Amino acid sequence: MRMTKSKLKVGVIGCGIVAKNGHLPWYAKSPLADVYAIADPDSAHLKKANNLYHPTLQYTDPMELLENSEIDAVSICSPHWAHKEQVIRAAKNGKHVLCEKPLTINLEDMNEMIHVVEQNGVIFQTATQKRFDPGFQRIKELIDNETLGEIYHISLYWFHSIPNLESKWIRKGLKFFKSLGIDILKEMGAWRLTDSRSGGGDFLDHGPHYIDLLRWWFGDIKNVSAQVRKFHDVHQYEDHTAALFSFKKCNTTAIFERSHNFVGRFAGKEQGRIHGMKGTITFDVPFEPKLKPMRVEKYLWTNIITDHPSQILYKSSRNPWNLSYARQVRSFINQVLDRSNNDVGFPKEWIPTIYDGKAALEVVHAVYESSRKQIVKEL
Ligand SMILES: NC(=O)c1ccc[n+]([C@@H]2O[C@H](COP(=O)([O-])OP(=O)(O)OC[C@H]3O[C@@H](n4cnc5c(N)ncnc54)[C@H](O)[C@@H]3O)[C@@H](O)[C@H]2O)c1
């Protein structure tokens, strides 16, 4: 059910961090879309987004937005627990959907969502935007071209520094900012740490991104062995995960470490190494939302003496229109309008689907089960 219009009327549901960085600015910049409506139960967030994007309509009840027949497509940027009902209502009302990861919390809900999306024939894109980062796309092309020979191992490390919210100095700081009218916990989306409705912790929140990249690069995951831990009482669920994956179609292993407990830069560290028989790729993603440049380097046997990379394979251009969030939204608009995706330079068959979103959720649950039962969990 693709559209023949020349300009989409878009609604954005949830006007917090990801909507501000990853959705609203890119619809607003597109000549092919209008930020027609926004919704958020928090009136302060609604007001801020309204002042920046001046949509025609604003709602405190997202379901009202989803009942408006003028709206063609929606971005769902609410907390995880709200996605299911919003996706189902959007699909039943014929709206195309770009939904944030994790698509929902449990697999039963996921199956219901898929059923409704299929029944209503709407386009559904999963917002695992890392695929759209030109650096990660470059890595995909190098893997597909077998530039590194057989890849035997991948090591991924993505840590954030979230201080202990219960420590004395943090509590003092939070109180001080509150006295100035700034609720830091709300603005940083602390529900993901402290609200049991999240349904999972740091790995449910961040794991889907790299699981999605791993599946895109190497195909489906065969099994997982993981240790999932929680160090801070104030966190409802895990804040540190180490997972080891193997794949169905290649003899590669991948280690993925994810944590909130890093002591270092607030923006965290996000780095990886991909080891092939003929060479190694390293990548460094300094801080995506601030549009810092990603760097991908290649090492060959000729570099074993100097330890300098043989080649800088990619360094981002700092052109915001080409960054992952922008390319994700541009691809969604192109899909809905049935346009070619050539202007994005990203083949349509690579755009993450609802089935990719489900596969990522399955792997997250396999990680949890592996750790809970201390087993290698087969998928
Ligand atoms: N793709 C990414 O890189 C990325 C980055 C951050 C967050 N996310 C995902 O996006 C979602 C939102 O995260 P965030 O960081 O923007 O959180 P946030 O707390 O900053 O923003 C969420 C917004 O949703 C509003 N909200 C609360 N309940 C709602 C409901 N029932 N319906 C509509 N809106 C509601 C809140 O008031 C808030 O303004 C989460 O699922 C998260 O995992 C993805």
Image (cartoon, grey):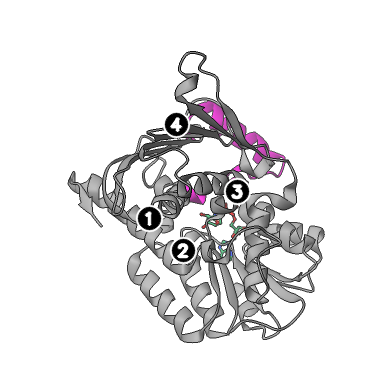
Q: Is mark 4 within 8 Å of ligand 1?
A: no
Q: Three-letter amino acid code at disc 2?
A: Leu
First-in-chain label (1 vs 3): 3
Q: Residue at x 39, y 47 (%)?
A: 236
Q: Earlier in the sequence, mark 1 or mark 4?
A: 1
The kind of residue on which mark 4 rests is: Gly
Q: Does any portion of residue 346 appear in the rendered image?
A: yes
Q: Residue at x 40, y 47 (%)?
A: 203
Residue at 46 percent of width and 68 percent of height: 354
Q: Give the mark toward the camera: 4 or 2.
A: 4
349 magenta-colored: no
* Residue extending farthest top: 305
Q: Which mark is residue 103?
A: 2
Of the image marks 3 and 2, the number of the one nearer the N terminus: 2
Question: Bounds of the magenta span?
Answer: 164-192
Q: Residues within 10 Å of mark 4 (few under 14, many from 20)?
A: some
Question: Where, quadrant-wise, is the C terminus in this rendering?
Answer: bottom left
Counting residues from the start of the chain, the first of labels 4 and 3 encountered is 3
Report whether 69 appears left or right of 172: right
Q: Is the shortest distance between ligand 1 and the CB of mark 2 under 8 Å? A: no
- Mark toward the viewer: 3 or 2: 3
Q: CA distance from mark 4 to mark 2?
A: 36 Å
- For mark 3, does the 10 Å Cα neighbourhood hold few (<14), some (14 to 19), or many (20 or more) residues? many
Which secondary structure, mark 3? loop
Q: CA distance from mark 3 to mark 2?
A: 20 Å
Q: Is 96 or 255 nearer to us in this picture?
A: 255
Question: Which residue is identified by label 3?
Answer: 133
Q: Nearer the viewer, mark 1 or mark 3?
A: 1
| Residue behind mark 4 | 279
Q: Quadrant of ligand 1?
A: bottom right
> In this figure, which residue is indicated by the disc labeled 1?
219
- Asked if marks 1 and 4 touch (Cβ < 8 Å), the reply is no
